[in-house]
Amino acid sequence: MIDRFGRWAMQAGSTVETVPDPAGARAAIARLAQRLSASRVTATREAAGFAPPGALVGGSAVQVADADLGISVAILAVAETGSVLLGSQAADDRLVGMLAQTHAVLVPAGVLCASLDDAAVALRAMAVRGPGQRLYLTLTTGPSRTADIERVLTIGVQGPRAVHLVVVGGGLG
Amino acid sequence: MRPGSSFRERYRRAVGDAQLRRNLLAFQRGWRASRDDRFAEYTGPDGGSGEAEFEILRSRLRAAKDAVIRDQAAVFARFKSEAEANGAVVVEAATAEQASEYVLGLCRRTGSSILVKSKSMVSEEIHLNQVLEAGGVRAVETDLGEWIVQLRGETPSHMVMPAIHLSRRQVGETFSEATGRRVSTEDVVEQVGLARTELRKDFLSARVGMTGANALIAESGTAMIVTNEGNEAMVTSLPDVHVILCGYEKLLATFEDAMTQVRLLPRSATGQAITSYTTFISGPDRPGRELHYVFVDNGRSAMRQDPDFVDALRCIRCAACASVCPPYQVVGGHVFGHIYSGAIGLVNTPFHHGLENAAGPQSLCVGCNACQSVCPVDIPLPRQILDVRRMAVARNGMPPVKRLALAVWRRPALFRALLRAAGVLSRPFARKGLLRIPVPRRHAWRTPPAPASRPARARLPEVIEAAAKPRLETDVGGRTVAYFVQCLTDAFAPEQAAASVALLQACGVRLLIPRRQHCCGLPFIDSGDPAGARRLARQTIETFESDAADWIVSAAGSCVAAMVHDYPHLFASEPSWRARAERLAERVVDLATFLDQVARLRPGALKTPVASDGVTYHPFCQSLNVLRADGCARRLLTEVRGLQLSELPEAGVCCGFGGSTSFDAPEVGRGIVDRKLENVDGTRAEVLVTDNPGCVLHLRGAAHASGRRLRVVHLAELLAQGLES
Ligand code: SF4
Ligand code: SF4
């Protein structure tokens, strides 16, 4: 299933790597930040522990706007489409995947499901009112794109220009 | 579309715009290839893939949508109570004005002088931007394509790709003009980058954001929004107030139904497996935030109550019906539609914007049925367009020439007498079946066919007994076939009739060719005159319904499709005639299907009469999209000994005959036939085979007028020549 997920994710324009454990995830993010020479890094609360030191957590839209790298954690991943489901309960965490130039998403292997039908079941559970309810969820598949001009595919319109998925075999601990 | 211009003006401007045709041709070709690839590579949970899986998916979504349309009140109530429990506000607006006023009220209350918008067709439908502007609120379109057309003072020409009618040069010029800076007219990446920088400040300052919704999931009160650019995330997150403008038809019962839509919508709309963002919003997600739903009726109730049109409410606004449509490629969405473009625009405009705005656009439909074949909810669009045509003709009447022609057509004896006279009079000008007379300039792209000096039926007996030793080995020897000649074949193409009869005789059947037969009524259906159509349909049923024949066979695919698929709708309110029509339909079959599936011609029984390998096949639209007989025709051709068939690119795109459309809107007919003939040129074939008489005459005339040496023949003619050799 991980292979299938990776294949479709790459077809959608994401890059994918697999690491065994949380330490591997931290190292993967560090490598990515270095490769991008990212000076402004932002992370969601769940991802904060994996970000390089000094990363901005809980920033405003103006602060987060066009950060070089944003880091989030997937709630769910769908092999059928190579998508990841994001939906922090804190609204400002959403800015991370929305405004950063490159978006890195940690995908604990345990959240991987086979199909959109499985995703439907999960979405229903997350819609139940109560403390676990998620009011805003986004199934993200690859970078922001448009083909509005002459049907020429162009990456990175308002959202991230690159999406890097880090599948963490043993979960995030 | 520049506001205020009439349909005629827009039509004239569009047909004079070669750039537009080029832009849209490239778009349609690219779209078709991606759409087909995305379905081909998809494997469903049960292992199906390709078009077969498309059929499974669309029947599932269709059923889900139908259930919601049926129980709309209950599903809406469920959605409303769930959404309200999640903290949203749900209001209903009966009219466009009420909906716009509500949105304006939200802007006023929050003191927002700008409203950031993600793409929403409903906001176009209700002219929201104009209302906001009049109220002192600036609407900012943040979807790239929408932003481009907004800067140009236009409306979207396509529901999914609003600016697809423009080239990058035109976009660059628009951007330069709007920003006062020099923006590249070549570099699309630079142009896209401009949207990111220019729109950012609006995102950060607006207090109200507006979007549409692709689905409204009742079980949880959730809006699903499908996008690519990332602007929608900002519109729904950054301002304090988010308002969703939507029609009731977006309701779905469950998340599973929404996922079926996710599998169909991006593949059909943009040729993507899934879009970059599929967002599920169930309620305001932080203190101080507001979420409002405005459900717009604006004619939807009337549509729901009209049995002829209720199916159109299944629409998921994928625009596949525009992306596939041949006349759309010629004139674009500012002409082929009103605000909603493509086939669905021809159908829903009378309900949202009045019949007067649908009358012009509907007249351009060539009835090729391509739209229904790709519609992910299987809406009977071509039939509904004819219903709109009927309404338009009832209100505005028919052009006098057409009325006169149909008055003659309606009367078999007069029709025959006049055409016979024409055949005799025109003999000096007729050569190889074409009439060499000057024709008006608008029509000069097609040399007209010459009327036969002796029509087909005058050459054929009423009964031809079965041959004792038939020429071909088949499964039908000794059985009886009634042959439907077709009025057009009778008057203009007796050689096609002779070929069909020769083939049927070779099969060893007893042939009945009733003298009383005339016309199935299709020209009347196509012209928006169902009463005239019924008259001829009754006559046809009476002539052929006796059970003397096992099958009723015709080489006129258009008429077979009419008898099998249009008669039931034509007689919807006359149950006894409807029953007779349905009984007849059970025995009606087109020639290709008859030879291939019923008679089961043996492979290699015929030998190619064509010396070289230059044959290509254009499937007649109804054979392809309605009768599904194209496979039979193709098999028959490939089984002819020695015949090499070259694949025709874009074979499934119409030839542009379209019954009377190519007379009423000759520029459209010409644009489509040019595309077809250029594709034929690419195959280097010397012979073009197709399987409908009207299309043969149209293609032959256009090939001749353009100076091509192409031979255009009916499938029956090519196969019959194979008998002789
Ligand atoms: S039937 Fe053909 S011409 Fe008419 S709307 Fe559909 S695709 Fe277009
Ligand atoms: S009518 Fe069908 S093809 Fe056209 S936009 Fe609606 S769903 Fe798509």
Image (cartoon, helix red, strand yellow):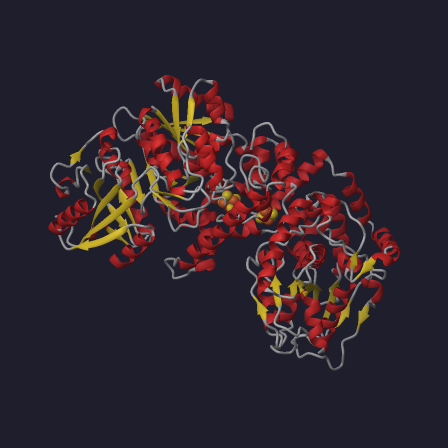
Q: Position of residue A106 (x, y in %)?
A: 20, 47
Whether B350 is drawn above or below B696: the answer is: above
Q: Position of residue A169 (x, y in %)?
A: 17, 55
B648 lies left or right of B241: right
Q: Residue furthest bottom?
A: B469
Name the residue nearer the viewer: B626 or A56: A56
Q: How many marks?
A: 0
Between B236 and B175, the residue placed more toward the observer is B175
State the quadrant of the N terminus of chain B: top right
Which residue is at 19% across, 32% downward?
A58
Q: Can residue B458 be seen at all in this image of the molecule?
A: yes
Quarter in which the C terminus of chain B is drawn? bottom right
| Res B587 seen here | no
Q: Is residue B171 left or right of residue B704?
A: left
Q: Is B227 in front, or is B101?
A: B227
Q: Position of residue B626 (x, y in %)?
A: 59, 56
The image quadrant that residue A18 belongs to is: bottom left
State left or right for residue B214 relative to residue B344: left
Occupied quadrant, residue B15 = top right
Q: Is residue B276 left or right of residue A106?
A: right
Which residue reaches farthest front? B182
Which residue is painted at 62% across and 37% down in the image?
B13
From the top left corner, tell me how far across and down residue B85 is, in percent. 31, 30
Q: Compared with residue B312, is residue B92 higher up or lower down, i.e. above or below?
A: above
